[in-house]
Image: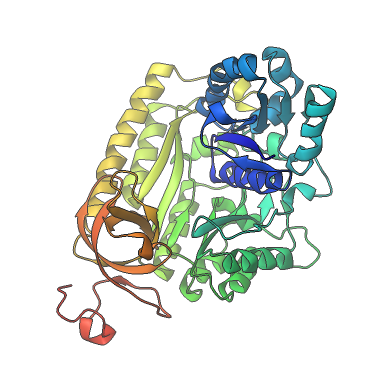
Amino acid sequence: MAKRIYIETYGCQMNEHDSEQILRLLERSDYLETKDAQQADLILINTCSVREKPEQKVYSALGRFKKLKEKKGTIIGVAGCVAQQEGWRLLERVPYLDLVVGTHAIPSLPQLLEKVLTLGEKVCETDFDPEGRYLDPFLPERPLSSVKSYVTIMQGCNHFCSYCIVPYVRGKEKSRPSQEIVEEVKCLAQKGAKEICLLGQNVNAYGKGMKEGIDFPELLSKLNEIEGIERIRFTTSHPKDLSEKLIQAYGSLKKLCEHIHLPFQSGSNRILERMNRGYHRETYLEKVHRLREVCPSIAITADVMVGFPGEEEKDFEETLDLMIKIRFDDLFSFKYSPRKGTTAAGWSDQVEEQVKQQRLSILQNIQKEITLQKNQALVGYLEEVLVEGHSKQNREDVTGRTRTNKAVNFKGDDHLIGCLVLTKITRAYAHSLYGECITTWKKKDPLRGKPDPDELGLLEGIPS
């Protein structure tokens, strides 16, 4: 008889993909996903410790699930970065917790569960795997429920930024062989994926140290040739490793979407040096300039941090200046929070919480206005949208994303899901767009902007 697994996922797309892999793996052991924790035989919390808020959510969730443990003996586990970081301390802090699974231990999850079930043992596995088995994919055995899918191409980071916990919880950089990635993407295409997003803590470092001598732009070129895949994205990039060769790929690879997420963290050279980021604001500005030269329509998003230890008002003003110069399409902004085990956590010149909050509010208000202006500028334009499903706000609407990764909603039904749709943007909001479906179509070249209707042969009578 099938058992039920409920997963809560916190943090980044890497964690979302790990949860997807866990579901595929445990499906082979007769576990089926449920969206209702009350019905679950196994509850797994997949965690992130890069920032403070996701880590706090873990303990809050464990508190919520305590009654289920007492009532029906539900097995409760924690996976991911917090599991890797805390290990046995989690089991000591939460007595009703059964299972702690580190970032490299997902392939061993069925065996670890068996120990809990048959021996009644509490289990903790946080060893790093030098062989890289944790990178092996669990390929889908049935058609995908989504038209987009994640593919891990590498994991870990060698940069050791002074604030970042990633090298300690994900390990050193390790890349997968390119042919394995190609075969996985082909499989996903056969199962219905139209878009893939390549994942890694630093994807542009892909291939370093590998015997086959292939770099990230060359991998992208291979994937660009796979039939059935319409779009390719990737995240996350480190500016230090953004090469001219990768920038040029935005001008030559038709399936590579016109969007890059390029965290800059601070606009102050003094703070960037303290962060050990390995570049200066001038370098970052030049790379953005080159990206826009090669691909004028590219959307650029980033991460930025306020309140890093020692950040003074002039440093913060330099961050705002860089934001205004670049005009990002969107920003993921957050207050610095000390991460145990990192260099910066021990520094004495921590910024007061009130100051951090004030700076974050100022920054977010500026970016909110820039994002809205950029979205408003698209009203009246035609955009290629890959329809992903129904809108959560209105079941009569479908939702999808442009090639520049902007969310678009419009009237539509099930038959549009998985289709490329030519959409005229009619309204703009702070976080999304609304449009009107013009037509579905297949074409070799991606479409953006205001094309000549006669040239396309598709939009006769439709004002552009």
Check the picture and name the quadrant holding the N terminus: top right
Residue at the image point whose x is 63% and y is 14% from the top: 70
Residue sitting nearer the eye, 199 or 271: 199
Instruction: Pinpoint residue 33: horizontal percent, then vertical percent.
Output: 59, 41
Residue at the image point whose x is 47% and y is 58% from the top: 287
Check the picture and name the quadrant holding the C terminus: bottom left
Instruction: Pinpoint residue 328: horizontal percent, then vertical percent.
Output: 36, 50
Q: Is residue 1 visible?
A: yes
Residue at the image point whose x is 73% and y is 26% from the top: 99
**Residue 316 vertical position relative to residue 181 in the rendered view, above or below:** above
Quarter of the image for residue 449 reads: bottom left
Which residue is outermost to the front? 1
Classify residue 214 as left or right of residue 411: right
Instruction: Pinpoint residue 140: horizontal percent, then vertical percent.
Output: 64, 57
Classify residue 286 as left or right of residue 201: left
Residue sitting nearer the eye, 236 or 244: 236
